[in-house]
Image (cartoon, rainbow, N blue to C red):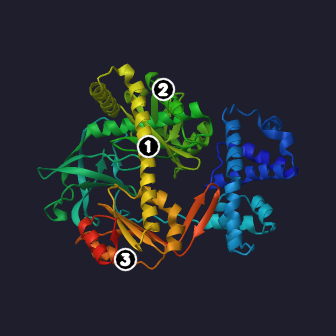
Amino acid sequence: MYIILDHTRTVMMVVTDGSLPSNVGGGSNIRNIIRRVFAVLKKNNWWDKLGMDGLLQLFQEHKNDLAKLYGPFGEYKSFDQIIKQEYERWAKTDDDKKVKLEKLLKQKNNQLSIDDWIFAMSTHGIPADTISQISKLPIPGNLYAELADRAARITKAPEAILYNTVHLPETTNLYYQTPKDGKFQAKIVTIFNNVQQQNIPNIVILNQSAFYPFGGGQDYDQGWLTISGERYSVNNVQKVGKVVLHILEKPLPNAVDTYVGQEVLAEIDLERRSILRNHHTATHIVFAACRRVLGPHVWQNGAHKSVNNAHLDITHFAPLTKEQEQAIENEVNKIILSAKQINKGFMNKADAEKEYGFRLYQGGIVPGNELRVVNIDGVDVEACCGTHCDSTSEVGWVRILKTQKLQDGVVRLYYVAGVKTIEVLNSEGEMINQLVKLWSISKNQLVEEGSKIFQEKKHFESAYNQIKAELIKSQMKYVIDGPNQRTVINSNEPNPTAYFSEIGKYIQQLKDSKKGLLFVAETFIYGAFGESNFNVEELSKQIEEEGQQLKVNKQNKISVKDGKKTTQVNDVLTFSILGKFNKNKALKYLKEQGFAQF
């Protein structure tokens, strides 16, 4: 009982604090803890009495009890859903994981090393209690210490530094002072040879710069530098240490020393900057909208802002539904229309943390004693570099393009803002107009007509697949019952998918009859043999065209499913050869090798 009370209190605290159960990082610890609760409840037959409602009430009792120490807990509308989903996942995957563990136990003769325990926990996601329950083995006393030790040893490789800038003066930053000015004057401090472009002299360091270098997930500014009367395109801007590197599209023609101290005219591509500024500001707003729609468990897990679009990675326990995507987009655009002021400025780190808390660090902990704080009035506040609008209204409009699950507990949202939204809406409108014209219907009929077309398409595809299966069945009957040991069949299929799906049913019969066959199409050859001695590599070598490389995949054992039963057939051969080759040449070669053509 102590385990249940201790573990549920821990889960309640960490989930309420913003963490989520997952298979990655600290989230895996939370998942292991909550799954141990489920396992203990089941093992002691307590689940039938407590149930999900009782478990959720237990979490609420913890909140009520701890409120005496920490004050009342805020509303967390998604908490119950997180716990319910974890239970569903645990219950659903239990049988599958049991099969995987039993297979591992069989391989290891029912003896598991510490590495085996960790493998089963990290790769298959099986809690230690479940492993112990199924294997009848005690949990190793050093298991959790070993897990912690291994996690501590995982370190990120330091980023390679290509240029030494420690001896150079810091580049004075102008992009925060005059973010909307397109021109400035500066002096050349030095020129670097580009080690990534055959050491050409095309990296310019200035004493001051309004070019924003890549940083904070935001792409760099582009523009032009006029040097010695010639205009050079600035294609890339990076920051190394405290120095900004302006990378030109072409090398400077004269000796490096002749440029040092020279004054240059710099111009920023303001259209590009405006797009990046809108995408960066939109990212803050999208994040705030996600927290409002999905709940306080949402934290930023990464972001990137480019000219084409932006994306934001958030912590969330499930893929987003279309309804949630729409709700987030609506909330984003409401915030934009509210024209909230965006305040940007530097603050003492301790003062900022005291005023705003650690929600400042959505993009990660910022080194140093000073933070640049971006505060969207009543919406979002973060420590953030990059370029931002002065009001949410400047963002214009945001369109969510798509969302996807990146990994367990992390969802990515792709979106556009400002003029890029106009481009997307125009493209979508043009697509609708083309469909209306193509189908000779009104816009109101699009969904109904499109649904009808796709239903018919699915029906015809299903019928076509049944016909293909019947054709393969007839071909296999001919091969197995016929007089020829080896048969080649001329195929018109665009890919070998149908053969991968169907041939396994007949592999045992091919083995019993010691026969084999090949399907030869324009871009692939698929083979199935009852013996494993056919030389696939020689066939590939004979048909390979000059300058073309064929991809060969083969296996000597096949798992055949019959309902819930799976049978493995060994010492056979199935293979595919994929790529560009001369089909007629292949058929001729196989005929010479004694294959009968069907």
| Residue 537 numbered tag | 3
At a point 62% along the width and 62% down the height, the residue shown is 566
Horizontal relation, residue 531 to residue 318: left or right: left
Give neighbour class at mark 1: few <14, some 14-19, many 20+ (Cα, 10 Å). Answer: few
Q: Secondary structure at mark 3?
A: helix
> Which quarter of the figure has residue 25?
bottom right
Under mark 1, the amino acid is Ala
Horizontal relation, residue 403 to residue 186: left or right: right
Nearer the observer: mark 3 or 2; the answer is 3
Q: Earlier in the sequence, mark 3 or mark 2?
A: 2
Q: Is residue 148 visible?
A: no
Which quadrant is home to the C terminus?
bottom left
Q: Which residue is mark 2?
A: 330
Q: Secondary structure at mark 1?
A: helix
Under mark 2, the amino acid is Asn
State whether residue 355 is above or below residue 378: below
Q: Which residue is mark 1?
A: 463
Nearest the eye: 184 or 230: 230
Under mark 3, the amino acid is Glu
Nearer the observer: mark 1 or 2; the answer is 1
